[in-house]
Amino acid sequence: MAVRVDLNVSLDGYATTTDQTPEHPFGQDWGRLVGAYAATRTFRERVLHETRGEGTTGVDDKYAEAYFEGVGAEIMGAGMFGLHNFPEDPDWQGWWGDEPPFRVPVFVLTHTPRPAIEMANGTRFEFLTASPEEALERATDTAAGKDVRIGGGPTVVKSFLEAGLVDQLHVGIAPILLGRGINLWEGLRGLEDAYDVSSESAESGTVHLTFRG
């Protein structure tokens, strides 16, 4: 069992974008940041539910496949779930659709109590007010020997890294500069000292950096 993180960042370390508008709720930079991942066959099948077999199948797809393998539970922040979009709507079920790609129990860290949400494909969203250690203990019990993935966003990921709770960190570094947002590496000087670090370049120009404890 391992505690894993998979995250996309820019060359200058930013894992969020800041150019959102009502017309473009994710912003144009988001597509640039995650474009290589979103182009993979695995992403198109697992997240977009496409069945035509389209999408890239190279190095980026290898890491996209690994993202979903062996995971028994997930922990994410309220922002990744989409709770901030409709915080007062008790019927809002997040922005992942009727068939979220997780297919495992997902623990959403929030200060807003909400009843759990059961989805059709095995995904169950459970809302917790808990420290990283408390949330991880709960997720580990639920995962029953499989891995626990810390899904994001970057603020949540940083809290687990700062607490020394992450066994494996995979970062897909997109060949773009953002210049602003939430920087994954800020405050984590010397993080590499606790890990064996390897890298692999993809056809897209993305550099896949993996920290293994």
Image (cartoon, grey):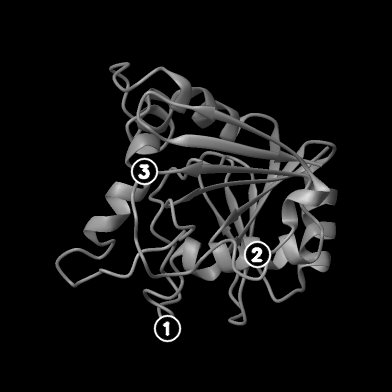
Tell me the CA gap for discs 3 and 1.
38 Å
Residue at position x 28%, y 17% in the image: 52
Q: Earlier in the sequence, mark 1 or mark 2?
A: 1
Tell me the CA gap for discs 1 and 2.
27 Å
| Numbered disc 3: secondary structure | loop
Tell me the CA gap for discs 3 and 2.
22 Å
Residue at numbered disc 1: 88
Residue at numbered disc 2: 158
Q: Earlier in the sequence, mark 3 or mark 1?
A: 1
Name the front one of labels 1 and 2.
2
Residue at position x 44%, y 62% in the image: 93
Tell me, yes or no, whether the two marked residues, 1 and 2, touch with CB atoms within 8 Å.
no
Q: Quadrant of the C terminus?
A: top right
Q: Nearer the viewer, residue 100 or 149?
A: 149
Residue at position x 40%, y 44% in the image: 174
**Residue 85 spot, x, y in % from top left:** 37, 74
The crowding category of the residue bearing disc 1, from other C-alpha atoms within 10 Å (few below 14, some 14 to 19, many at least 20), is few
